[in-house]
Amino acid sequence: LTDHLREQIGMLDLSPRDRLLADEVIGNIDEDGFLRCTLEELLEAMNEFVRRMAEEHELDEGPLPLFSMADVERMLTVVQG
């Protein structure tokens, strides 16, 4: 299921940011097709990743925008589609 979903997402015209979020959603789907975590947990994990990447790479252009719950819900809908 995971491979199939990633293949399908790969065919969509998504930004790298949306692709990253979609991949995280897919990575949290179990073999029965159910999301193994809450949307809040997914959001927190992704924003922690963004913060860590910004710190590690000491970005000059300022902080990266964090994901919102609307972003997570939108990507969940895309993956479900």
Image (cartoon, rainbow, N blue to C red):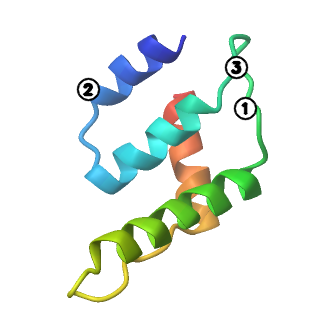
- Residue at 72% over, 31% down: 35
Residue type, mark 3 in image: Asp
Q: Is residue 61 left or right of residue 74?
A: left
Q: How packed is label 2: few (under 14 Cα within 10 Å), some, or many (20 or more)?
A: few
3 vs 2, front mark: 3
Residue 58, image x, y percentages: 29, 80
Question: Toward the viewer: 9 or 63?
Answer: 63
- Residue at 39% over, 66% down: 53
Q: Which residue is mark 3?
A: 30
Distance from disc 3 to disc 2, alpha carbons, whole Å, reads 22 Å
Q: How packed is label 3: few (under 14 Cα within 10 Å), some, or many (20 or more)?
A: few
Question: Toward the viewer: 52 or 16?
Answer: 52
Task: Classify mark 2: helix, strand or loop.
Answer: loop
Q: Earlier in the sequence, mark 1 or mark 2?
A: 2
Residue 26, image x, y percentages: 54, 30
Q: Earlier in the sequence, mark 1 or mark 3?
A: 3
Residue 65, image x, y percentages: 41, 77
- Residue at 38% over, 51% down: 18
Residue type, mark 1 in image: Leu
Q: Earlier in the sequence, mark 3 or mark 2?
A: 2
In the image, residue 60 above or below residue 36: below
Task: Classify mark 1: helix, strand or loop.
Answer: loop
Residue type, mark 2 in image: Met
Q: Which residue is mark 1?
A: 35
Image quadrant holding the N terminus, namely top right
Distance from disc 1 to disc 2, alpha carbons, whole Å, reads 22 Å
| Residues tagged 1 and 3 counted as in contact (Cβ below 8 A) | yes
